[in-house]
Image (tube, grey):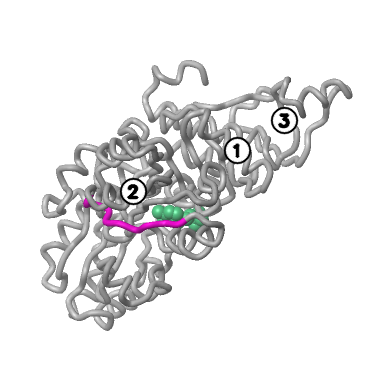
Amino acid sequence: MNHDNDQYDIETLGVRAGIERSQFNEHSEALFLTSSFVFNSAAQAAARFKGEEPGNIYARFTNPTVTMFEQRLAALEGAQRCVATASGMSAILATVMGLLSAGDHIVASRSIFGSTVQLFNNIIARFGVETTLVSPTDVDEWRRAVRPHTKLFFVESPSNPLTEVSDIGALAALARESGARLAVDNCFCSPALQRPLELGADIVIHSATKYLDGQGRVLGGAVLGSKELMEGVFTFLRTAGPTLSAFNAWVFLKGLETLKLRMDAHSASALQLASWLEQHPGVERVYYPGLPSHPQHALALRQQRSGGGIVAFDVKGGKEAAWKVVDATRMISITANLGDAKTTITHPATTTHGRLAPEQRIAASIGDGLLRVAVGLESVRDIQADLARGLDTL
Ligand SMILES: *Cc1c(COP(=O)(O)O)cnc(C)c1O
C-alpha cells in the first residue's frame, strides 16, 4: 500500500505504509544486510547507474529496508519524499549541504537543540553560510532578520527544553514572502501529533533516535519534503554518505508501528504530571504546551493533537535544589536522551546546554533550577512518586 496512502488513518499508515515484500513473501518487514546488489547483465548495471532503470545499486544510497522506512515516514508526514540519514544531526547537515551554497543565509530559532546551534555557528559558518538566531515566538524578529540571500528558516516546535511553541503557519507565510524555505525539526511531536507540511512548512527534519524508535536503541534521522527539494538532499547523501544503516531502519520500522499509541500515552501522562507539578510548593514554574498556563497554549492546541511527552519545570532553589531532585530519583533515568519508554531527567544548564556561554543560556531562559523530564511509559503514579522524593524535601 503506497499509491493509496491518502485514504488511510495515521494508525494504519504507521503499521502498513511502505512495505515491499521479497520473493519469499515475508509478513514482517525484511532486514537486508547487504552493501551491494547484483545485476543480471552489463546492460542492466549501466541502466541502473544512469538512473534509467529503478532499483538498488549500493547501500550508501539504496537499500530496501531503508526505503521501506523512508516510504512509511513519508506517508505519516504526508511528504512526497523522505531521505533517511545516520542521525538527526546529519539530517540537518544534509539539508543545509543539499540546499544552500556559500553566501546564503539562515534564520533560525534561538531555542533549538544545542548541537544544532553548534553546527550552524561553528561548522556551517566556516563554509560561508551565516545564521541569525531569533526568538521562537516573535515573528517580527524573523522578518527583521531576513536578508536578500536568506534561503532557510529553521525552527523546532515545541522547543527543547522550554517547550516554546512557534507559529508554523505564520513562519511558513513569511518564508514564502522572503524566498526562503521553512524547515521544522518535528522531533518533539512526531507526525502522530503534528504534521508541519500541512501547516505550510517545506521541509520536516527528524531525529529518529527519539520517538520514532521510541525505545532508546539506535540513532537515525530523516529529511522530508517535495521531490524537487529532496533531490538536492539525496544527492548530498549519495555522494557524502551519512547513510542510515539497514539495521537501524528496521528498528525504526517496528517503532513506527506503535508510534501513535505511544505518543498518546506519553502525552496523557505528561499532562497529568505537569498539572501535579504546577501545584507543588517546591516548583516555581512549569513549561508544558498542554497546560492552560502555557503562553502559547491556544496555538499549541491548533497545531498539535496534544502537548507531547516533554515537561520542563523550574524548582525553587537553583542548581543545588535541582540536583537534589535528580539525585533523589530511584527509578527515573538520569540521561540526556528523550523519547524513550523509560522516563528520563536532565539538568539542561549543566548538560545539554552546558556548552553555551552563560549569557547565551540566560538569553535562552535556561535557568539553574530548570529540569527537563521526558515522560516515559511507566505508571504516571510511579513517575510522580519518584520526583516527589526530592521535591518534597525542598
Ligand atoms: C536529539 C535531537 C537532535 C539530534 O539528533 P541525533 O539523532 O542525536 O543526531 C536534533 N533535534 C532535536 C530536537 C533533538 O532532540
Secondary structure at numbered mark 1: helix
Please give left or right for residue 100 compared with residue 140 in the image: right
Residue 220 visible in the shown view: no
**Which residue lies under the disc numbered 1?**
234
- Lower sequence index among marks 1 and 3: 3
Q: Position of residue 211 (x, y in %)?
A: 42, 48
Q: Confirm or reject: label 3 Cβ below 8 Å from ligand 1.
A: no
Secondary structure at numbered mark 3: loop
Could you say which is closer to the camera, residue 7 or residue 273? 7
The answer to whether residue 4 is above or below residue 233 is: above
**Mark 3 and mark 2: span between their CA atoms?**
41 Å
**Mark 1 and mark 2: span between their CA atoms?**
27 Å
Q: Position of residue 194 (x, y in %)?
A: 32, 38
Residues drawn in magenta = 130-138
Amino acid at the residue labelled 2: Val
**Which residue lies under the disc numbered 3?**
56
**Mark 1 and mark 3: span between their CA atoms?**
14 Å
